[in-house]
Image: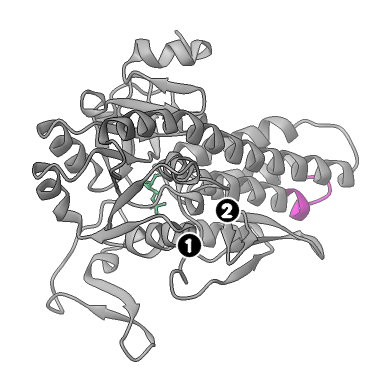
Amino acid sequence: MNVNGRHFRTIWLKESDPRVVQIINQQALPHKFEIIDLSTVEDIRRAIKDMYVRGAGLIGAAAAYGMYLAACEAGKGTFDRDLLAAAGILKNTRPTASNLAWAVDAILAALTGREGTRAQKEEAARREAASIADADAEFCRNIGHHGLAVIEALAEKKKGEAVNILTHCNAGWLAFVDYGTALSPIYAAFDKGIPVHVWVDETRPRNQGASLTAWELAGHGVPLDLIPDNAGGHLMQRGMVDLVITGADRVTRRGDAANKIGTYLKAVTAEENGVPFYIALPSSTFDFTMKDGVREIPIEERDPEEVRYISGKTRSGTIASVLICPEAVPARNWGFDVTPARYITGLITDRGIAEPSEAGIMKLYPEASL
Ligand code: MRU
């Protein structure tokens, strides 16, 4: 997508030194657009863990480039062993998104046991990482194409009035390599001249909606309003939401979907108010080994300080982090929740829209049939 007229992906190799991975630092957005260099597996581990990069698809692509750096760092006679160790380190960074393990395992499968010189192995790792990043962008482009049909159908009913879409967290191009998932159909509709308007949940505690989704949509010219996380129910009751689309971090074979904490509340409220609720996801986010998402999907619990403190720009222009509760109050910070398939209208994937059931998903993914 474009930033000030220049096309950017969220991750790439430095032109002057292809052993350096470059990313957009999402910790600095929306107040500063900053590109940072990552040169070691440890740099990548920290970037994922501390959310310099975040979002299911981008975490996968970053891990893939982490494996490329692992190939560059590996010892002479210990290539396979060093790669396996790096895979363990990277997989341990964030437990919920399936794309992370999917990407690391794909690189491991392509590289371990492989014959060839050191230079050939490094080159193979670079190619594999690039193809994972390209696949992510292509998945997201196709999601935009399939999701556009949902927005078009609603736009027809609204006869020229804007289609109001609510989204939670950031499942735009910043969360992937390009285009995004939940936002990809919105960009496709907007670019086609269909009037759309987005209600952007701020998404406490880290405010990915306020800082990232709002930044992305505004940068593309898409009309939006930022709303507190707890406003969605009121808007739905008043008929001010035509559609909810969110992303997902892991979706089971029967369609239960883990996404940023708070998504489940929106899904239940959408059902109560007859508002269609879609989840958009690339093929790499399915976890066909799991069925019952509530019981099986691991939910990341993050540092409570993310709840107790909030950071932003003060009126005088400095970036500050401030405590929002009494000094000694404890907090808990679950990163994700699971929306059971029964609350989901459809799963917008790169292969088309799947009914959220095992039968519906297997129609699009017959290779995962048992
Ligand atoms: O914790 P984050 O910011 O990495 O959250 C993951 C997400 O981006 C959201 O859950 C998103 O809606 C899923 S799609 C990337």
Where is residue 361? Give x, y as percent.
40, 17
Secondary structure that dominates the magenta span: loop
Asked whether residue 204 appears in the rendered view, the answer is no
Residue at 47% in and 22% down: 352
Numbered disc 2: secondary structure: loop
- Type of the residue with mark 1: Gly
User: What's the magenta region?
Assistant: 71-78
Earlier-in-chain disc, 2 versus 1: 2
- Write down the residue under mark 1: 219
Give above or below for 232 relative to 6.
Answer: above
Quadrant (top left, top right, bottom left, bottom right) of the C terminus? top left
CB contact under 8 Å: marks 2 and 1: yes
Picture quarter containing residue 329? bottom left
Numbered disc 1: secondary structure: helix
- The mark found on residue 251 in the picture is none
Where is residue 174? Give x, y as percent.
50, 54
- For the residue pair 187 and 115, the one nearer the viewer reads as 187
- The mark found on residue 1 in the picture is 2
